[in-house]
Image: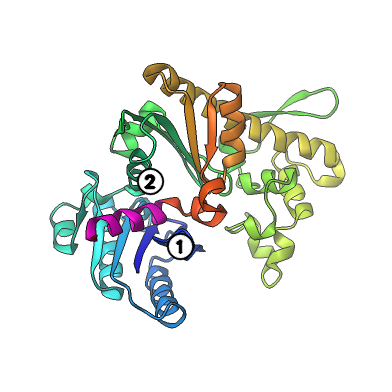
Amino acid sequence: MFVGIDVGGANTKVATSGVDGFADTIYAPLWKNNAILYNVLSEVKQKFETEAGGGLEAVGVVMTGELCDCFETKREGVLYIKKALSSVFENVNFFDNECAFRDGPEVDRDPLSFASTNWLASAKLLSEQYRDVIFTDIGSTTTDVIPIVGGEIKAKRTDLERLKSGELIYSGVLRTNLATLLEKVEIGETGEACKTSAELFAITADAYRVLGYLNSSDYHCESPDSHAFVGREEEGKSRISAMRRLARVVCCDLEEIGEDSVLGIAEQVKEVQVTELVDSMKSQKQKYKLKMVVSAGIGDFIVKEAADLLELEFLSLSSLYGKKISATFPAYAVSRLLEQTFS
């Protein structure tokens, strides 16, 4: 059995190489306490040993968690993640920015070559199947927009360069603070413009919970007011709780502005994210003459809307692999690539 692990700053994703295999997203906020990674990895290993009967041939690793502010540098973060994986699993293989697998000592020699590689594993696997596409993955926190042309990945290799080029959009459908997306919103029947409060009152998960794109089990992170719902987390992620948080974005409560205004705020969140994605995909479409979008992640509904606006053919990987694999696609991709390497 080949296992892929994608260590992010908020979530650790795990998947096996078989389409009918295991795939899971585990909320593990390293930025709060990076020691949680050891606990998560130990639980994952135990799960495979007990439920899957062991037989792990190799583990493939990609990461983005090195950017967490619990680490002073990316170098420190990469080495910490490497140490955690190597201490829990045997035969660990780390995917680098040249799309090659390396062992622990090679990570020690050049840590930055292994930073932010999860999107690259996904793009590498897809480039073997789709030679000319825009690969888009919207997750909880970020959005990747990766041009693949003639089977070659054209994206830059660092987050800084991808931010400059629009290949990385730092917003997702769960954890993004609405204040970073909406400077102003239109409120009420008159559509009067109102500035938003620069507080962490609501996140994108709240907007999409209210609009019906997510249910409470899809809300794979803490709500901004989670401290008020200790022991009753389900209530904290309910639609009514999300609506109350959205009202606070304009310094109101739900009683004050009403449900219609809150729904309007949520719709404007989606509009902003669709527009930003359209701008990025339009640039790739025009530059490389691409006609198709392949989408992974939990934000398929945003990609579909953007693709339709650009008259691009749309393919959701969830329709091929199922929602769980699509949501953990970098982990699945690195497990598949590792299996190919060992075969």
Residue type at numbered disc 1:
Lys
Query: Would residue 219 be visible to someone looking at this image?
Result: yes
- Residue closer to the observer: 261 or 121: 121
Quadrant in which the C terminus appears: bottom left
Numbered disc 1: secondary structure: loop
Name which residue lies at 86% across and 26% down. 189
Label placed on residue 32: 1
Q: Is 86 located above or below residue 291 in the figure?
A: below
Residue type at numbered disc 2:
Ser
Where does the image place residue 190, in percent across and percent down from the top left?
84, 22
Taking the magenta stretch, the answer to whether it contains residue 150 is: no
- Residue closer to the observer: 9 or 90: 90
Where does the image place residue 6, in percent across and percent down from the top left?
38, 57
Label placed on residue 10: none
Q: Residues within 10 Å of mark 1 (few under 14, many from 20)?
A: few
- Residue closer to the observer: 48 or 322: 322
Q: Is 259 located above or below residue 20 in the figure?
A: above
Q: Quadrant of residue 324?
A: bottom right
Q: Seen in the image, is 52 located left or right of residue 204? A: left
Q: Which residue is mark 2?
A: 122
Where does the image place residue 41, in percent across and percent down from the top left?
39, 71
Residue extent of the magenta highlight: 330-342
User: Are circles 1 and 2 on residues that touch, CB within 8 Å?
Assistant: no
- The label nearer to you, 1 versus 2, is 2
Tag 2 or tag 1, which sits nearer the N-term? 1
Q: Seen in the image, is 195 located left or right of residue 25? A: right
Question: What is the spatial separation of the Cα atoms under label 1 and label 2, in whole angstroms?
Answer: 27 Å
